[in-house]
Image (cartoon, coloured by chain):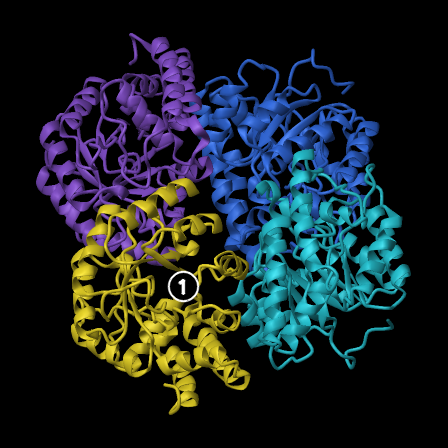
Chain colours: A blue, B purple, C yellow, D cyan
Amino acid sequence: MTQFSKTKEPLRGIVPPMVTPLNADGSLDSESVEKLIEHLIAGGVHGIFILGTTGEFSGLSYRTRKELIRQTCSLVKDRVPVLVGVTDVSIEESIDLAEIAASAGAYAVVAAPPFYVNIDQKELYSYFKQLADSISLPMFLYNMPSHTKLTIEVDTVVKLAAHERIIGLKDSSAHAVYFQSLCHILKDQEDFVLMVGPEEMMAETVLMGSFGGVCGGANLFPKLYVELYEAALNRDFDKLKSCQHAVMEISRTIYQVGHYKSSYMKGLKTAMSFLGLCQPQFAPPLYPFSEAEELELRSRFEKIASSLMPQSS
Amino acid sequence: MTQFSKTKEPLRGIVPPMVTPLNADGSLDSESVEKLIEHLIAGGVHGIFILGTTGEFSGLSYRTRKELIRQTCSLVKDRVPVLVGVTDVSIEESIDLAEIAASAGAYAVVAAPPFYVNIDQKELYSYFKQLADSISLPMFLYNMPSHTKLTIEVDTVVKLAAHERIIGLKDSSAHAVYFQSLCHILKDQEDFVLMVGPEEMMAETVLMGSFGGVCGGANLFPKLYVELYEAALNRDFDKLKSCQHAVMEISRTIYQVGHYKSSYMKGLKTAMSFLGLCQPQFAPPLYPFSEAEELELRSRFEKIASSLMPQSS
Amino acid sequence: MTQFSKTKEPLRGIVPPMVTPLNADGSLDSESVEKLIEHLIAGGVHGIFILGTTGEFSGLSYRTRKELIRQTCSLVKDRVPVLVGVTDVSIEESIDLAEIAASAGAYAVVAAPPFYVNIDQKELYSYFKQLADSISLPMFLYNMPSHTKLTIEVDTVVKLAAHERIIGLKDSSAHAVYFQSLCHILKDQEDFVLMVGPEEMMAETVLMGSFGGVCGGANLFPKLYVELYEAALNRDFDKLKSCQHAVMEISRTIYQVGHYKSSYMKGLKTAMSFLGLCQPQFAPPLYPFSEAEELELRSRFEKIASSLMPQSS
Amino acid sequence: MTQFSKTKEPLRGIVPPMVTPLNADGSLDSESVEKLIEHLIAGGVHGIFILGTTGEFSGLSYRTRKELIRQTCSLVKDRVPVLVGVTDVSIEESIDLAEIAASAGAYAVVAAPPFYVNIDQKELYSYFKQLADSISLPMFLYNMPSHTKLTIEVDTVVKLAAHERIIGLKDSSAHAVYFQSLCHILKDQEDFVLMVGPEEMMAETVLMGSFGGVCGGANLFPKLYVELYEAALNRDFDKLKSCQHAVMEISRTIYQVGHYKSSYMKGLKTAMSFLGLCQPQFAPPLYPFSEAEELELRSRFEKIASSLMPQSS
């Protein structure tokens, strides 16, 4: 990885929102960070996005966030682009994180709306503009209304897309009309990167022409998501069907133990611990599954893992 | 159309949610009903769905609803299946409408959750079961959380799909993960019809294997939506791209005059009046555009219409 | 009750939203209607409001709604004012119900926003104006955002309050700032009746100068709510404290069996059946408690009833 | 102020959520901090709450937050209790802020739910328990669903109220049923402090027996809110009526310029600048009023100020 430039190719493919490996005391589990990065790169991912929602950014102290930025960039060594989440409620802290990301050699930053104060789109535009004006790296917008309780409306995205440092948007809304509207209205800005978060809809959006996906499940089975992406890109519908089936099974089983609002996060990270990629430790307010829940998850996981091996794990 | 039978082919294709032509005094504009039906059938649609949200069912008196059921079935004369919305807050009224639909020769009924009382999924299941048990026609579920403020959750759909008279679901949530989850979990029930409402996402869901779409814009330009459906079915990506472009232009322009919550409904029906398919008259609480808004719409409409003619209008 | 006139005193006090007694087959339980009306009048209530949310209006057929209007007015025989809910999604049906109410001798009608189509305040204003223009009785607005998913905003109320037939508002939002804002901005329109729905906040609003409450629990224990109202009116804080305690106990126990969204409705109506005031039968989508739930409710009910008797039951 | 002890009297009265004076560059305006503190204490407030929502805590860097804690405690010099908001998405940062507050001599901390991750009540309970276990000062819960999008449910409050360091709750929901439910269920825990945030409902809750209010408008006119509190406490209804009138006029005018979601915050802080108490500078994502808006506000402000002077300003 080197200095980003608008003349280069835009980012395409699978960019996992990397899980943050933690120790029981809340500190960074650096050994697992390294293992996980190698797992992802070996799986063929096209980039790594740290400090997103799946990376539990909001629960981490600033110290831990900064440590993770430096470690990840240093370990990845430009083999794939590193995207760094700088979402925060304080713009000063976001700018600070962005500068650390720039120094560490990251490819770009990713920012969701500030998520406490209730604001209008005009204030949201002004916020993102001020943030982009204050940093040196390129920036992705991050639409995440289930968590920020605020959508970056289509008209606001269009205005922001004109900013030289705003190069794309990750949409985690799962709202297909919103995403198709963005694809349509920004179609002449060909290097503006539009990717979805929810892995269950990644394939259909790539078939329709978008750039890829920020798929949480790729932490677990990176090859599977890369294969699904390539199948969609190549319009290989047989391959797409079988990969999509596996992705939907993961969604239906691994992400739904206990029917908590946090089942996705708890299921994903705990299943990763079965592969030795991290410990089943979470930043508060999340905490580990009960023993019975973990047993249930293990049984579901083994069924899926055995059906995937060896080709896609 | 004749008696429905599970041995027959399930419904596939474009099933417009027919706009209800009204006179200025709120009564049914029967002349336009006939014109509109012929327009739709000439456009190649695969079915007609009356008394949905786009049909303004909720604003119509029972007398008008019953009149429309009888007129439509009589005019369509089994050339395409007629689906009849029976959504209501009173189950007795829904059953009454369903029996009128059955007598008139409709193909099936369509029911959204009762939309006033706040209920849990268990009550929702019980409600739909009681409704399906009390009628003679097959029934589609209708997921419309933006209006009913209640999602028919995936697990509830699965339980209801086992009912012999529940044969499909129309999903207007625009939530791609919800829809893919339904497609996955019901994949072995091959004749269970899954269609989306929002036309902007119809193509991608058909590419992924679903049955078609209940596209409002097909009231205006039925051929365009039929072509888009067929392009997706046949994986003709060039055709798909040009049709999708036109559909998104309609979405971005015709449906967004005035930025009201009701802009879709007002834009669609008023644009249809430009083609002589109905009058720009609405059931309260909606009312016509101002003159300036109508002028703005006409200018947008003419641009789109001229780009479509003659092949797809 | 006789012809309403703006020169008369505005309505004040406790106006229970009367539960609708039903038979197991969904028809009106006329015998219980009579018993319940006598129970309420004997308890000293200042009016009776039928076909509100607690009256399960939305689940009733039009036939049943009309029957209840006629029976209630005939049985009450002008001993107290009868208010008739005409809330509906079709303005034609609302107007029809309002005319039946007028013929039957009702005092006023009560209308919440139409609850299916998503609209803006301008459309809401236009809707209420059209409704008020089309009927002969005075009308109360009914703010019920938990069910209609739309607030009648303060500015909209102010504009509507200028209409000669709009004489008050029942607020069931439980939003104290909203209610105080209405009281403040309408303070010079001294006969505009402002009442809250939630009984838990009735006393404090009367202390602050409002007109009374539409208290569901008054179906069960009318005297208790009348006493609480009078204590607040007379600033008898000792009496107020003991009555408020009883009201809060009802809220905490009778209304919370099973933690359903419908626990209030199911608990209230089932407890009333213990007093022989109706059967524990509901309009779909609600259905009776399980046997265990009913037992739990009975035990809670007996504890409260014994603490109230004989003075307030 | 000295070490808190459960044997002492619980906090009662008016505890303004202090506005954070900022310079144009986002740094703390220390001169105004001092002026504002003296203004509040001279106005008779019973405590000062810093780093709440009105204090724009979420937009401030950690450096600024820590600086404000130290300055405020040092300037107040135990004349009134200082409450310090430690709400954050990272529990480590909350604990850090709490320890700084303890060292600085604060009376208690105040914590709202973590506001990014979607969680269940069980996780929320666990979070608050872990936080209370990890700090040395007493703690108030802070219910603020409009911003955190999560209510601390009554049952969760009851469980947390048993914790020795959790001594009260500030409720900014404006939901009168919720607040009365808390008052009822916790009535035997007589020193558990229950206060509301919205000043429009403070008087009625004090009439019903609660402890006071965290009134934003007290930044501007502290005497007015203290007088309203005392009138409610002493059941002086004439005084209460005139003070409530003034408070509602402030709510209706000062807080509603421009009809933004942020109008309260922008109106309050800008009006304070008219009194020389701070500059009209905000933490992003908020920004100053336009010139026209400021003129409109000034005209409204002068009308209110002149009606209040000299007795209550």
Q: Is residue A307 left or right of residue A54?
A: left
Query: Relative to C304, is A84 above or below?
Result: above
Which residue is located at x 21 percent, y 28 percent?
A: B47
The residue carrying mark 1 is: C191
Q: Quadrant of residue C116?
A: top left
Q: Is residue D243 left or right of residue C93?
A: right
Locate residue D281, reporting x and y percent: 77, 41
Q: Is residue A264 left or right of residue D197?
A: left
Residue D180 at least partly seen: yes
In the picture, the quarter occupied by the N terminus of chain A is top right
Residue A56 at least partly seen: no
In the picture, the quarter occupied by the C terminus of chain A is top right
Query: Relative to C112, is C233 above or below?
Result: below
Query: Relative to A125, is A287 above or below?
Result: below
Q: Residues within 10 Å of mark 1 (few under 14, many from 20)?
A: some
Query: Relative to A243, is C129 above or below?
Result: below
Locate residue A151, reporting x and y percent: 56, 36
Q: Quadrant of residue B2?
A: top left
Locate residue C154, reporting x and y percent: 48, 51
Locate residue B235, reporting x and y percent: 38, 17
Residue type at mark 1?
Answer: Asp
- What is the secondary structure assignment of the residue under circle 1? loop
Total numbered labels placed on residues in the image: 1
Which residue is located at x 61 percent, y 82 percent?
A: D188
In the image shown, does B152 or B91 lie closer to the viewer? Answer: B91
Which residue is located at x 58 percent, y 28 percent?
A: A156
Q: Residue furthest bottom?
A: C310
Label 1 marks which chain's residue?
Answer: C
